[in-house]
Protein backbone atom coordinates (compact mmCIF):
# COMPACT_ATOMS: atom_id res chain seq x y z
CA UNK A 1 0.00 0.00 0.00
CA UNK A 2 2.92 2.34 0.68
CA UNK A 3 4.32 1.60 -2.78
CA UNK A 4 0.97 2.40 -4.37
CA UNK A 5 0.76 5.70 -2.47
CA UNK A 6 4.35 6.95 -2.44
CA UNK A 7 5.90 5.01 -5.32
CA UNK A 8 7.79 1.74 -5.51
CA UNK A 9 11.12 3.50 -6.03
CA UNK A 10 11.32 4.86 -2.49
CA UNK A 11 9.67 1.94 -0.71
CA UNK A 12 11.89 -0.59 -2.44
CA UNK A 13 15.02 1.56 -2.26
CA UNK A 14 14.67 2.45 1.42
CA UNK A 15 13.75 -1.14 2.28
CA UNK A 16 16.95 -2.36 0.65
CA UNK A 17 18.95 0.43 2.24
CA UNK A 18 17.71 -0.56 5.69
CA UNK A 19 18.55 -4.21 5.05
CA UNK A 20 22.00 -3.24 3.77
CA UNK A 21 22.80 -1.19 6.88
CA UNK A 22 21.66 -4.06 9.08
CA UNK A 23 23.88 -6.42 7.07
CA UNK A 24 26.87 -4.21 7.87
CA UNK A 25 26.14 -4.28 11.61
CA UNK A 26 25.41 -8.03 11.73
CA UNK A 27 28.94 -9.01 12.93
CA UNK A 28 28.76 -6.40 15.67
CA UNK A 29 25.37 -7.74 16.76
CA UNK A 30 26.65 -11.33 16.66
CA UNK A 31 29.62 -10.48 18.89
CA UNK A 32 27.34 -8.61 21.28
CA UNK A 33 24.74 -11.33 21.97
CA UNK A 34 22.42 -13.85 20.39
CA UNK A 35 19.44 -11.66 21.25
CA UNK A 36 20.94 -8.70 19.42
CA UNK A 37 21.66 -10.86 16.37
CA UNK A 38 18.08 -12.13 16.30
CA UNK A 39 16.77 -8.56 16.60
CA UNK A 40 18.87 -7.49 13.60
CA UNK A 41 17.60 -10.45 11.58
CA UNK A 42 13.99 -9.62 12.43
CA UNK A 43 14.48 -6.01 11.38
CA UNK A 44 16.07 -7.19 8.13
CA UNK A 45 12.88 -9.12 7.46
CA UNK A 46 10.92 -5.86 7.44
CA UNK A 47 13.24 -4.49 4.78
CA UNK A 48 13.08 -7.70 2.74
CA UNK A 49 9.29 -7.79 2.95
CA UNK A 50 8.77 -4.76 0.71
CA UNK A 51 10.76 -6.21 -2.20
CA UNK A 52 8.23 -8.05 -4.34
CA UNK A 53 5.17 -5.89 -3.60
CA UNK A 54 7.09 -2.71 -4.43
CA UNK A 55 8.48 -4.22 -7.62
CA UNK A 56 5.00 -5.30 -8.71
CA UNK A 57 3.76 -1.76 -8.12
CA UNK A 58 6.53 -0.46 -10.37
CA UNK A 59 6.09 -3.03 -13.13
CA UNK A 60 2.42 -2.11 -13.33
CA UNK A 61 3.57 1.29 -14.60
CA UNK A 62 6.61 0.23 -16.61
CA UNK A 63 5.80 -3.10 -18.31
CA UNK A 64 3.70 -3.07 -21.51
CA UNK A 65 1.04 -5.82 -21.37
CA UNK A 66 2.72 -8.23 -23.80
CA UNK A 67 6.10 -7.79 -22.11
CA UNK A 68 5.03 -8.27 -18.49
CA UNK A 69 6.19 -11.86 -18.23
CA UNK A 70 9.73 -11.46 -19.51
CA UNK A 71 10.39 -8.08 -17.85
CA UNK A 72 9.14 -9.11 -14.41
CA UNK A 73 10.78 -12.55 -14.54
CA UNK A 74 14.15 -11.05 -15.52
CA UNK A 75 14.03 -8.88 -12.40
CA UNK A 76 12.71 -11.68 -10.18
CA UNK A 77 15.46 -14.00 -11.43
CA UNK A 78 17.88 -11.66 -9.70
CA UNK A 79 17.50 -13.20 -6.22
CA UNK A 80 18.34 -16.64 -7.61
CA UNK A 81 21.41 -15.31 -9.41
CA UNK A 82 22.34 -13.54 -6.17
CA UNK A 83 22.06 -16.85 -4.33
CA UNK A 84 24.50 -18.45 -6.78
CA UNK A 85 27.00 -15.63 -6.28
CA UNK A 86 26.55 -15.54 -2.51
CA UNK A 87 27.02 -19.29 -2.05
CA UNK A 88 30.28 -19.13 -3.99
CA UNK A 89 31.74 -15.84 -2.77
CA UNK A 90 30.79 -16.29 0.89
CA UNK A 91 32.75 -19.51 1.13
CA UNK A 92 35.79 -17.86 -0.41
CA UNK A 93 35.53 -14.86 1.93
CA UNK A 94 35.21 -17.11 4.98
CA UNK A 95 38.45 -18.84 4.00
CA UNK A 96 40.44 -16.01 2.45
CA UNK A 97 38.67 -12.76 3.34
CA UNK A 98 40.21 -9.99 5.42
CA UNK A 99 40.35 -10.39 9.18
CA UNK A 100 38.41 -8.00 11.34
CA UNK A 101 38.42 -7.17 15.06
CA UNK A 102 37.79 -8.01 17.81
CA UNK A 103 38.78 -11.66 17.22
CA UNK A 104 40.57 -11.33 13.87
CA UNK A 105 38.16 -13.71 12.17
CA UNK A 106 37.42 -13.79 8.45
CA UNK A 107 33.68 -14.57 8.39
CA UNK A 108 32.60 -10.95 9.11
CA UNK A 109 34.11 -9.99 5.74
CA UNK A 110 31.09 -11.66 4.08
CA UNK A 111 28.75 -9.11 5.67
CA UNK A 112 31.06 -6.14 5.13
CA UNK A 113 31.66 -6.89 1.44
CA UNK A 114 28.02 -7.54 0.59
CA UNK A 115 26.93 -4.64 2.77
CA UNK A 116 29.27 -2.23 0.96
CA UNK A 117 28.08 -3.48 -2.43
CA UNK A 118 24.50 -3.06 -1.21
CA UNK A 119 25.14 0.58 -0.25
CA UNK A 120 26.55 1.33 -3.71
CA UNK A 121 23.54 -0.33 -5.32
CA UNK A 122 21.04 1.55 -3.13
CA UNK A 123 22.44 4.97 -4.02
CA UNK A 124 22.57 4.02 -7.70
CA UNK A 125 18.93 2.86 -7.51
CA UNK A 126 17.71 6.05 -5.87
CA UNK A 127 19.63 8.18 -8.38
CA UNK A 128 18.70 6.34 -11.59
CA UNK A 129 15.22 4.88 -11.08
CA UNK A 130 11.86 6.64 -11.45
CA UNK A 131 8.42 5.42 -10.42
CA UNK A 132 6.94 5.72 -13.90
CA UNK A 133 7.91 6.67 -17.47
CA UNK A 134 6.18 10.03 -17.05
CA UNK A 135 8.47 10.98 -14.14
CA UNK A 136 11.72 9.72 -15.65
CA UNK A 137 14.01 12.69 -16.49
CA UNK A 138 16.08 11.12 -19.28
CA UNK A 139 13.80 8.64 -21.04
CA UNK A 140 13.27 9.40 -24.73
CA UNK A 141 9.90 10.67 -25.93
CA UNK A 142 9.57 7.65 -28.20
CA UNK A 143 10.13 5.15 -25.40
CA UNK A 144 7.83 7.03 -23.03
CA UNK A 145 5.09 7.09 -25.62
CA UNK A 146 5.63 3.41 -26.43
CA UNK A 147 5.24 2.35 -22.79
CA UNK A 148 2.49 4.73 -21.72
CA UNK A 149 0.34 4.03 -24.78
CA UNK A 150 0.38 0.32 -24.04
CA UNK A 151 -0.14 0.34 -20.28
CA UNK A 152 -3.66 -0.37 -19.06
CA UNK A 153 -5.66 2.71 -18.08
CA UNK A 154 -5.97 1.45 -14.53
CA UNK A 155 -2.27 2.00 -13.99
CA UNK A 156 -2.05 5.46 -15.54
CA UNK A 157 -5.33 7.37 -15.52
CA UNK A 158 -6.74 6.66 -12.08
CA UNK A 159 -3.62 6.17 -9.99
CA UNK A 160 -4.14 9.36 -8.03
CA UNK A 161 -7.75 8.59 -7.05
CA UNK A 162 -8.19 7.69 -3.40
CA UNK A 163 -9.40 4.18 -2.69
CA UNK A 164 -10.70 3.02 0.65
CA UNK A 165 -8.70 0.10 2.06
CA UNK A 166 -11.99 -1.36 3.33
CA UNK A 167 -13.51 -1.14 -0.16
CA UNK A 168 -10.47 -2.84 -1.67
CA UNK A 169 -10.37 -5.58 0.98
CA UNK A 170 -14.03 -6.32 0.35
CA UNK A 171 -13.35 -6.81 -3.37
CA UNK A 172 -10.33 -9.01 -2.70
CA UNK A 173 -12.30 -11.27 -0.36
CA UNK A 174 -15.07 -11.77 -2.92
CA UNK A 175 -12.77 -12.43 -5.86
CA UNK A 176 -12.15 -16.13 -6.68
CA UNK A 177 -9.18 -15.10 -8.83
CA UNK A 178 -7.50 -13.47 -5.81
CA UNK A 179 -8.02 -16.60 -3.71
CA UNK A 180 -6.54 -18.67 -6.53
CA UNK A 181 -3.31 -16.64 -6.36
CA UNK A 182 -3.23 -16.71 -2.55
CA UNK A 183 -3.64 -20.49 -2.49
CA UNK A 184 -1.13 -21.12 -5.26
CA UNK A 185 1.42 -18.78 -3.68
CA UNK A 186 1.07 -20.44 -0.28
CA UNK A 187 1.34 -23.96 -1.72
CA UNK A 188 4.25 -23.04 -3.98
CA UNK A 189 6.25 -21.54 -1.15
CA UNK A 190 5.60 -24.60 1.02
CA UNK A 191 7.33 -26.78 -1.54
CA UNK A 192 10.06 -24.22 -2.21
CA UNK A 193 10.96 -23.85 1.47
CA UNK A 194 11.06 -27.63 1.84
CA UNK A 195 13.54 -27.69 -1.03
CA UNK A 196 15.48 -24.74 0.36
CA UNK A 197 15.72 -25.61 4.05
CA UNK A 198 15.06 -29.32 4.53
CA UNK A 199 16.65 -31.19 1.65
CA UNK A 200 20.21 -30.57 2.93
CA UNK A 201 19.14 -32.37 6.10
CA UNK A 202 17.74 -35.24 4.01
CA UNK A 203 21.00 -35.57 2.10
CA UNK A 204 22.99 -35.55 5.32
CA UNK A 205 20.82 -37.80 7.52
CA UNK A 206 19.49 -40.28 4.95
CA UNK A 207 22.06 -40.30 2.15
CA UNK A 208 25.08 -39.48 4.28
CA UNK A 209 26.13 -36.60 2.05
CA UNK A 210 26.47 -33.03 3.30
CA UNK A 211 25.37 -30.95 0.30
CA UNK A 212 25.88 -27.72 2.25
CA UNK A 213 29.66 -28.25 2.18
CA UNK A 214 29.72 -28.59 -1.61
CA UNK A 215 29.43 -25.07 -3.01
CA UNK A 216 28.93 -26.29 -6.56
CA UNK A 217 26.04 -28.63 -5.73
CA UNK A 218 24.48 -25.97 -3.52
CA UNK A 219 24.47 -23.50 -6.41
CA UNK A 220 23.35 -25.82 -9.22
CA UNK A 221 19.62 -25.96 -8.26
CA UNK A 222 19.43 -22.16 -8.12
CA UNK A 223 21.31 -21.87 -11.41
CA UNK A 224 18.65 -24.12 -12.94
CA UNK A 225 15.89 -22.00 -11.41
CA UNK A 226 17.51 -18.78 -12.63
CA UNK A 227 17.45 -20.21 -16.15
CA UNK A 228 13.84 -21.42 -16.07
CA UNK A 229 12.56 -18.18 -14.54
CA UNK A 230 13.87 -16.15 -17.48
CA UNK A 231 13.02 -18.85 -20.05
CA UNK A 232 9.48 -19.09 -18.71
CA UNK A 233 8.98 -15.34 -19.10
CA UNK A 234 9.99 -15.39 -22.75
CA UNK A 235 7.88 -18.49 -23.48
CA UNK A 236 4.83 -16.97 -21.79
CA UNK A 237 5.05 -13.69 -23.70
CA UNK A 238 5.70 -15.56 -26.97
CA UNK A 239 2.55 -17.63 -26.49
CA UNK A 240 0.53 -14.51 -25.76
CA UNK A 241 2.04 -12.35 -28.50
CA UNK A 242 1.50 -15.02 -31.17
CA UNK A 243 -2.01 -15.65 -29.79
CA UNK A 244 -1.26 -19.33 -29.32
CA UNK A 245 -2.93 -19.11 -25.91
CA UNK A 246 -4.87 -16.45 -24.06
CA UNK A 247 -3.20 -14.75 -21.13
CA UNK A 248 -5.24 -16.80 -18.66
CA UNK A 249 -4.40 -20.10 -20.34
CA UNK A 250 -0.73 -19.13 -20.55
CA UNK A 251 -0.60 -18.37 -16.83
CA UNK A 252 -2.29 -21.68 -16.03
CA UNK A 253 0.07 -23.64 -18.28
CA UNK A 254 3.21 -22.12 -16.80
CA UNK A 255 1.90 -22.48 -13.27
CA UNK A 256 1.02 -26.14 -13.82
CA UNK A 257 4.52 -26.89 -15.07
CA UNK A 258 6.00 -25.03 -12.11
CA UNK A 259 3.97 -26.93 -9.50
CA UNK A 260 3.06 -30.36 -10.86
CA UNK A 261 6.61 -31.15 -12.05
CA UNK A 262 8.34 -30.29 -8.73
CA UNK A 263 5.70 -32.41 -6.98
CA UNK A 264 6.67 -35.41 -9.12
CA UNK A 265 10.40 -34.94 -8.61
CA UNK A 266 10.00 -34.40 -4.86
CA UNK A 267 8.40 -37.84 -4.59
CA UNK A 268 11.12 -39.27 -6.83
CA UNK A 269 13.79 -37.81 -4.52
CA UNK A 270 12.32 -39.77 -1.62
CA UNK A 271 12.73 -42.99 -3.60
CA UNK A 272 16.25 -42.30 -4.81
CA UNK A 273 17.43 -45.06 -2.46
CA UNK A 274 21.13 -44.63 -1.80
CA UNK A 275 22.01 -42.91 -5.07
CA UNK A 276 23.26 -39.45 -4.24
CA UNK A 277 23.69 -38.64 -7.93
CA UNK A 278 20.09 -39.53 -8.75
CA UNK A 279 18.80 -37.61 -5.74
CA UNK A 280 20.78 -34.51 -6.80
CA UNK A 281 19.35 -34.77 -10.34
CA UNK A 282 15.81 -34.94 -8.96
CA UNK A 283 16.57 -32.02 -6.64
CA UNK A 284 17.85 -29.86 -9.50
CA UNK A 285 14.78 -30.70 -11.60
CA UNK A 286 12.40 -29.95 -8.71
CA UNK A 287 13.97 -26.58 -7.90
CA UNK A 288 14.60 -25.64 -11.53
CA UNK A 289 11.12 -26.38 -12.88
CA UNK A 290 9.50 -24.48 -10.00
CA UNK A 291 10.85 -21.34 -11.68
CA UNK A 292 8.03 -21.49 -14.22
CA UNK A 293 5.57 -20.34 -11.54
CA UNK A 294 6.97 -16.82 -11.88
CA UNK A 295 5.30 -16.72 -15.30
CA UNK A 296 2.22 -18.32 -13.75
CA UNK A 297 0.50 -17.07 -10.62
CA UNK A 298 3.34 -14.64 -9.86
CA UNK A 299 2.53 -12.48 -12.92
CA UNK A 300 -1.24 -12.70 -12.64
CA UNK A 301 -1.41 -9.77 -10.21
CA UNK A 302 -0.22 -7.52 -13.04
CA UNK A 303 -2.84 -8.90 -15.43
CA UNK A 304 -5.97 -8.87 -13.29
CA UNK A 305 -5.52 -5.54 -11.49
CA UNK A 306 -2.44 -3.57 -12.58
CA UNK A 307 -3.33 -0.60 -10.42
CA UNK A 308 -3.40 -2.76 -7.27
CA UNK A 309 -0.65 -5.21 -8.28
CA UNK A 310 1.59 -4.14 -5.41
CA UNK A 311 -1.13 -4.54 -2.78
CA UNK A 312 -2.12 -7.90 -4.25
CA UNK A 313 1.47 -9.13 -4.19
CA UNK A 314 1.77 -7.98 -0.59
CA UNK A 315 -1.31 -10.02 0.30
CA UNK A 316 -0.31 -13.21 -1.52
CA UNK A 317 3.35 -12.95 -0.51
CA UNK A 318 2.27 -12.76 3.13
CA UNK A 319 0.44 -16.05 2.68
CA UNK A 320 3.51 -17.50 1.00
CA UNK A 321 5.75 -16.39 3.85
CA UNK A 322 3.55 -18.26 6.32
CA UNK A 323 4.67 -21.45 4.57
CA UNK A 324 8.27 -20.46 5.16
CA UNK A 325 7.54 -20.29 8.88
CA UNK A 326 5.43 -23.45 9.19
CA UNK A 327 6.99 -25.88 6.68
CA UNK A 328 10.33 -26.40 8.49
CA UNK A 329 8.55 -27.06 11.79
CA UNK A 330 6.20 -29.57 10.22
CA UNK A 331 9.14 -31.30 8.57
CA UNK A 332 10.93 -31.53 11.91
CA UNK A 333 7.82 -32.98 13.57
CA UNK A 334 7.51 -35.62 10.83
CA UNK A 335 11.16 -36.70 10.92
CA UNK A 336 11.71 -37.75 14.52
CA UNK A 337 13.85 -40.87 13.94
CA UNK A 338 17.63 -40.59 14.33
CA UNK A 339 20.44 -41.66 12.04
CA UNK A 340 20.64 -45.01 13.79
CA UNK A 341 17.18 -45.93 12.44
CA UNK A 342 17.80 -45.39 8.72
CA UNK A 343 14.77 -47.33 7.46
CA UNK A 344 12.37 -45.46 9.73
CA UNK A 345 13.97 -42.12 8.93
CA UNK A 346 13.80 -42.80 5.20
CA UNK A 347 10.09 -43.69 5.45
CA UNK A 348 9.44 -40.49 7.39
CA UNK A 349 11.16 -38.39 4.74
CA UNK A 350 9.13 -40.08 2.05
CA UNK A 351 6.00 -38.91 3.85
CA UNK A 352 7.43 -35.38 4.00
CA UNK A 353 7.92 -35.42 0.24
CA UNK A 354 4.46 -36.88 -0.37
CA UNK A 355 2.80 -34.19 1.76
CA UNK A 356 4.78 -31.45 0.02
CA UNK A 357 3.89 -32.89 -3.38
CA UNK A 358 0.20 -32.97 -2.45
CA UNK A 359 0.38 -29.32 -1.36
CA UNK A 360 2.12 -28.39 -4.62
CA UNK A 361 -0.56 -30.21 -6.62
CA UNK A 362 -3.39 -28.65 -4.61
CA UNK A 363 -2.13 -25.15 -5.37
CA UNK A 364 -1.86 -25.98 -9.07
CA UNK A 365 -5.37 -27.45 -9.20
CA UNK A 366 -6.96 -24.49 -7.42
CA UNK A 367 -5.26 -22.11 -9.83
CA UNK A 368 -6.45 -24.17 -12.80
CA UNK A 369 -10.03 -23.97 -11.54
CA UNK A 370 -10.27 -20.42 -10.16
CA UNK A 371 -7.30 -18.59 -11.62
CA UNK A 372 -7.86 -15.80 -14.13
CA UNK A 373 -5.70 -13.20 -15.84
CA UNK A 374 -8.72 -11.20 -17.02
CA UNK A 375 -8.83 -7.67 -15.70
CA UNK A 376 -11.20 -7.67 -12.75
CA UNK A 377 -14.26 -5.44 -12.57
CA UNK A 378 -12.82 -3.59 -9.58
CA UNK A 379 -9.37 -3.05 -11.15
CA UNK A 380 -10.02 0.65 -11.89
CA UNK A 381 -11.22 1.35 -8.35
CA UNK A 382 -14.72 2.47 -7.42
CA UNK A 383 -16.67 4.84 -9.67
CA UNK A 384 -16.10 8.41 -8.52
CA UNK A 385 -19.74 8.80 -7.60
CA UNK A 386 -19.88 5.54 -5.66
CA UNK A 387 -19.86 5.23 -1.93
CA UNK A 388 -16.98 3.05 -0.77
CA UNK A 389 -19.32 1.21 1.53
CA UNK A 390 -21.62 0.24 -1.34
CA UNK A 391 -21.89 -3.36 -2.32
CA UNK A 392 -21.53 -4.56 -5.90
CA UNK A 393 -24.02 -2.75 -8.08
CA UNK A 394 -25.52 -3.68 -11.43
CA UNK A 395 -23.01 -1.72 -13.50
CA UNK A 396 -20.15 -3.40 -11.65
CA UNK A 397 -21.51 -6.81 -12.56
CA UNK A 398 -21.91 -5.78 -16.18
CA UNK A 399 -18.34 -4.52 -16.22
CA UNK A 400 -17.15 -7.79 -14.75
CA UNK A 401 -18.91 -9.81 -17.45
CA UNK A 402 -17.72 -7.58 -20.24
CA UNK A 403 -14.18 -6.92 -19.00
CA UNK A 404 -11.63 -9.49 -20.04
CA UNK A 405 -8.52 -7.34 -19.91
CA UNK A 406 -6.72 -6.00 -22.94
CA UNK A 407 -6.04 -9.46 -24.31
CA UNK A 408 -8.96 -11.32 -22.77
CA UNK A 409 -10.55 -11.92 -26.16
CA UNK A 410 -7.56 -13.84 -27.42
Image (spheres, grey):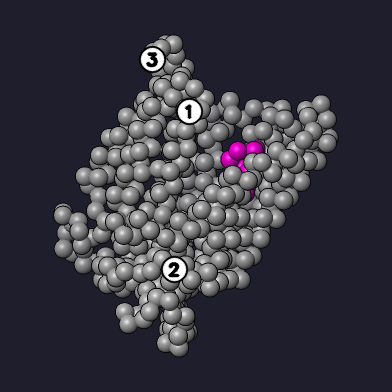
The tag earlier along the polypeptide, 3 or 1, is: 1
Where is residue 249? Give x, y as percent: 53, 70
In magenta segment, residue 198: yes
Q: Quadrant of residue 368?
A: bottom right
Q: Position of 6 compared to 334: left or right?
A: left
- Magenta residues, dominant SS class: helix
Is residue 225 visible in this depiction of the protein? yes
Q: Residue at x 56, y 66 (%)?
A: 179
Query: Disc 3 to disc 1, how far (Cα)?
Result: 18 Å
Magenta segment, which residues?
191-199
Query: Residue 254 colored magenta?
Result: no
Q: Which label sits on residue 100?
A: 3
Near mark 3 (Cα within 10 A), the count class, few <14, some 14-19 or many ≥20, is some
Image position, residue 298 (x, y; %): 48, 58
Q: Is residue 102 above or below residue 299?
A: above
The residue identified by callout 2 is: 166
- Determine the image quadrant of residue 163: bottom left
Amino acid sequence: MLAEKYGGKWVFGLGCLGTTILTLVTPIAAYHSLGMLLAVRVLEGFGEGVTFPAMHAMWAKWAPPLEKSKLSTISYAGPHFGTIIALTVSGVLCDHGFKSPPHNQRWPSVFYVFGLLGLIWCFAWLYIVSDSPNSHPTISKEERQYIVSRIESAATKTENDKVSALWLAGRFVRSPAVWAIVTSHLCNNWGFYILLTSLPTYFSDVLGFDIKNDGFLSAVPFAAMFTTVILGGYIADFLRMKKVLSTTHTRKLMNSIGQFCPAIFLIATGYANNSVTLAVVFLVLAVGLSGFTLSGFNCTHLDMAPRFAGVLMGLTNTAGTVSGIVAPYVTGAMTTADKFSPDILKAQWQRVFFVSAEIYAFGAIIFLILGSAKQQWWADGPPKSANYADTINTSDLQNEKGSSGIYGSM
